[in-house]
Amino acid sequence: MIECSIVGRKCRIFGSEKPEYLLVQPSARHENGSLEAEVAQLEALAPAPFLLATVELEDWTIDLMPWWDGNISRDPEAGKHGQDTLEFILQELLPELESRYGDLPVVIGGYSLGGLFGLWASCQTDRFRAVAAASPSVWIHGWLPFAKKHVPMADAIYLSLGDREEHVKNQAIARVGDNLRAYYELLLNADAPAQTCTLVWEEGNHFNDNAGRLARAFAWCLQQMK
């Protein structure tokens, strides 16, 4: 693992010295302890050498939410800086990594809000060949209306959700299952759909086996691209 700072943002780089694919994962500080476990599982599953670059975020909700939703965060800055995060990835992170490792196919992915961000980002640019969205927060207010108007530009999209995630008392979060099923149908029937997409049901609630779910999500994307 290599730690570095790119225009003031802390990044961690894992994987092969001669990668064939580049994986990008916006990462909250609470995920730092599980990154090595994720990489270890991914190395066992990946069909080709890869590089995983994580971007440590100052604030999970402020840096990733595509728009404001008071059920996720009451901070008035939430929803204002997702575009800033995307611009950092496109204009700073990817050019820096390309200067070191060459022009590689890019997969964007993440867990929870990170997965939601990856799906949203793939609607803003065609820079990402695939999206690995593990337990994405598609329960955010307005996601389905947005999804009906914006088709992802990626070739492959992986969606997953724990089979207990929608069985919660919080009614906003509880809609995650229905929203993800509806979103999957939208992807299957879009005018310009991804070449392939899948919806996987994992065991447990939102906090069960995060590292494994992300590893399987990224591995599936690499298998589709290989």
Image (spheres, rainbow, N blue to C red):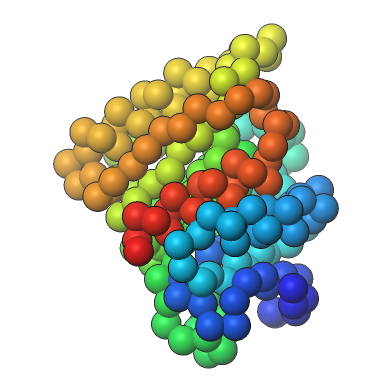
Which sits in the foreground, 83 or 118?
118
Residue 8 image position (x, y, % from top left): 75, 76
Which sits in the foreground, 67 or 213?
213
Residue at screen point 53% across, 70% down:
50
Residue 152 image position (x, y, % from top left): 34, 49
Residue 202 image position (x, y, % from top left): 56, 29
Determine the residue located farthest toward the left in the rendered image.
Answer: 191
Image position of 53 (left or right of 198) = right
| Image quadrant containing the C terminus | bottom left
| Image quadrant containing the N terminus | bottom right
Question: Does residue 26 appear anywhere in the picture?
Answer: no
Question: Does residue 60 appear anywhere in the picture?
Answer: yes
Q: Is residue 217 above or below residue 200?
A: below
Tell how many labels.
0
Image position of 191 (left or right of 135) = left
Residue at screen point 69% across, 37% down:
209
Which sits in the foreground, 198 or 54?
198
Determine the residue located farthest toward the top in the rendered image.
Answer: 169
Q: Is residue 140 above or below residue 58?
A: above
Residue at screen point 50% across, 27% down:
201
Image position of 101 (left or right of 62) = left
Determine the residue located farthest toward the bottom in the rendered image.
Answer: 99
Residue 38 image position (x, y, % from top left): 67, 53
Which sits in the foreground, 45 or 169?
45
